[in-house]
Amino acid sequence: MNIGLTGGIATGKSTVSSMLAMKGALLVDADIIAREVMLPGHPVLDEVTEHFGQDILFEDSTLNRKKLGEIIFHNPEQRTALNAITHPAIRQEIRERTEAYERQHPDRLVVADIPLLLEAREQYPFLEQIAVVYVPRELQLERLMNRDALTREAAEARLSSQMDIEQKKSLADILIDNSGSLVETQLQVDNLWRRMVQI
Ligand SMILES: CC(C)(COP(=O)(O)OP(=O)(O)OC[C@H]1O[C@@H](n2cnc3c(N)ncnc32)[C@H](O)[C@@H]1O)[C@@H](O)C(=O)NCCC(=O)NCCS
Ligand SMILES: Nc1ncnc2c1ncn2[C@@H]1O[C@H](COP(=O)(O)OP(=O)(O)OP(=O)(O)O)[C@@H](O)[C@H]1O
């Protein structure tokens, strides 16, 4: 039993997945996997460096995330190139971890937190239902600017790199509105848990 959990950048996916984990869900986190494939020595990072040049690395061979982010959040072609290199490996790992958890724990809910899930839904046929964590765009921008200390321009660039949050909302099987207080979000998570796990 699984769900794919998505939303836009800073709409509250991590907040909601932590609440689900507290209830007993098993988590697969695409952002963590995305960081693993960018560690020194990983063939994905080698390929990324081949495409973008050694300038995106620090002297100790680790990735300068800020530098690569500045390139890809301002240039759709370079973003597509990065996605083409990184996404197949990330997706494969998400699938393997989700299926392994389901095999090992058939009675538990597995939650795969994937920011760009709806940008490529057809690549995730193994996910049974899609939950979208939603906040309106203006609140999304505000939370992103506050959390990451970004200028409005930098935050806008990140939002524009993803499918619009209203469109994601319209594609949801399960909608979690995170625009209210954390208590209100927790209540929705409690309801979702009851429906999914039928306790
Ligand atoms: C460009 C990178 C180095 C910037 O790193 P940084 O530490 O600034 O951001 P972080 O990794 O924490 O990502 C923050 C959020 O940005 C968004 N984001 C990241 N990559 C992309 C992308 N290619 N397209 C659109 N949005 C993206 C996601 O919502 C993600 O949750 C990094 O995001 C990266 O390696 N991206 C490529 C892999 C990827 O697509 N990851 C996200 C989905 S699994
Ligand atoms: N209901 C809420 N009320 C106020 N602040 C919130 C609420 N939910 C989340 N936040 C804050 O909004 C920010 C974004 O939340 P979170 O980090 O969970 O988003 P995310 O979708 O996981 O982000 P990313 O796409 O970058 O992984 C955080 O600073 C978090 O503390």
Image (tube, helix red, strand yellow):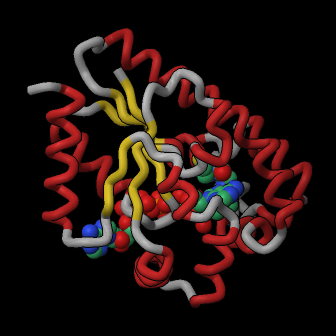
Q: Position of residue 52 (x, y in %)?
A: 88, 58
Q: Quadrant for residue 65, please give it.
A: bottom right
The quarter of the image holding the N terminus is: top left
Does residue 46 appear anywhere in the picture? Answer: no
Residue 36's place in the image compared with 188, above or below, is above
Residue 197's place in the image compared with 7, above or below, is above
Determine the residue positioned at 83% across, 64% down. Answer: 76
Of residues 144 and 53, which is closer to you in this image? 144
Q: Quadrant for residue 63, please give it.
A: bottom right
Q: Position of residue 111 (x, y in %)?
A: 37, 35
Q: Is 49 positioned to the left or the right of 120 in the image?
A: right
Residue 116's place in the image compared with 3, above or below, is below
Does residue 123 appear anywhere in the picture? Answer: yes
The quarter of the image holding the C terminus is: top left
Determine the residue positioned at 80% across, 42% down. Answer: 85
Direction left: furthest residue: 199
**Image quadrant, ligand 2:** bottom left
Determine the residue positioned at 20% across, 32% down. Answer: 195
Q: Is 50 positioned to the left or the right of 108 in the image?
A: right
Q: Is 52 positioned to the left or the right of 37 in the image?
A: right
Of residues 184 and 86, which is closer to you in this image? 184
Q: Position of residue 150 (x, y in %)?
A: 54, 84
Q: Is 32 positioned to the left or the right of 47 in the image?
A: left
Determine the residue positioned at 64% across, 82% down. Answer: 154
Direction front: furthest residue: 170
